[in-house]
Image (cartoon, grey):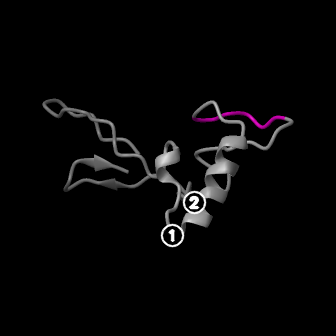
Amino acid sequence: MCLAKRPGRHSREPPALVRQRFSEADISNITPESHRYCANLFHSLESRGMYTPYGLKQTLVVPGTLGGATWSGGSLIQSWDICL
């Protein structure tokens, strides 16, 4: 996504479409047992932040590789002066 660059307009970075990080604070608290299991699994995974490459250990990859946003092309909304 990009904002059209026109004289007098200020460009800004659009908000992320998907989760950019995952921390222990994001683990579910549905039940204490579920939280404990997920926390143990979380701490056993290899993760060095965004785009951690796969390795020989189980790896937490955020954002994931299964898609989410459609990559079908851009659209121009002239009345809003914006390119999506």
Q: What residue is shown at x 29% (from left), y 40% (from top)?
A: 4
Q: Position of residue 53 (x, y in %)?
A: 73, 34
Quick one: 60 or 27, which is closer to the camera?
27
Q: What span is in magenta?
A: 50-55
Q: Which residue is mark 1?
A: 30
Quick one: 21 or 84, which is closer to the camera?
21
Amino acid under disc 1: Ile
Q: Position of residue 76 (x, y in %)?
A: 34, 53
- SS at mark 1 in the image: loop
Q: What residue is shown at x 58% (from left), y 46% (from top)?
A: 63
Quadrant containing the N terminus is: top left
Q: What residue is shown at x 49% (from left), y 43% (from top)?
A: 20
Residue 30 is left or right of residue 58, and the answer is: left
Residue furthest to the front: 32
Amino acid under disc 2: His
Query: Is label 2 in contact with label 1 (beta carbons under 8 Å)?
Result: yes
Q: Using the image, tell me which numbered label, if any, was put on residue 7.
A: none
Residue 8 is left or right of residue 43, and the answer is: left
Question: Going from the N terminus, do you reach mark 2 or mark 1 first?
Answer: 1
Residue furthest to the right: 56
Residue 67 in view in this figure: no
- SS at mark 2 in the image: helix
Q: Few, some or many C-alpha atoms within 10 Å of disc 1 (few <14, some 14-19, many ≥20)?
A: few
Residue 52 is covered by the magenta coloring: yes
Q: Which residue is mark 2?
A: 35
Q: What residue is shown at x 53% (from left), y 55% (from top)?
A: 27
Quick one: 12 or 76, which is closer to the camera?
12
Residue 29 in view in this figure: yes
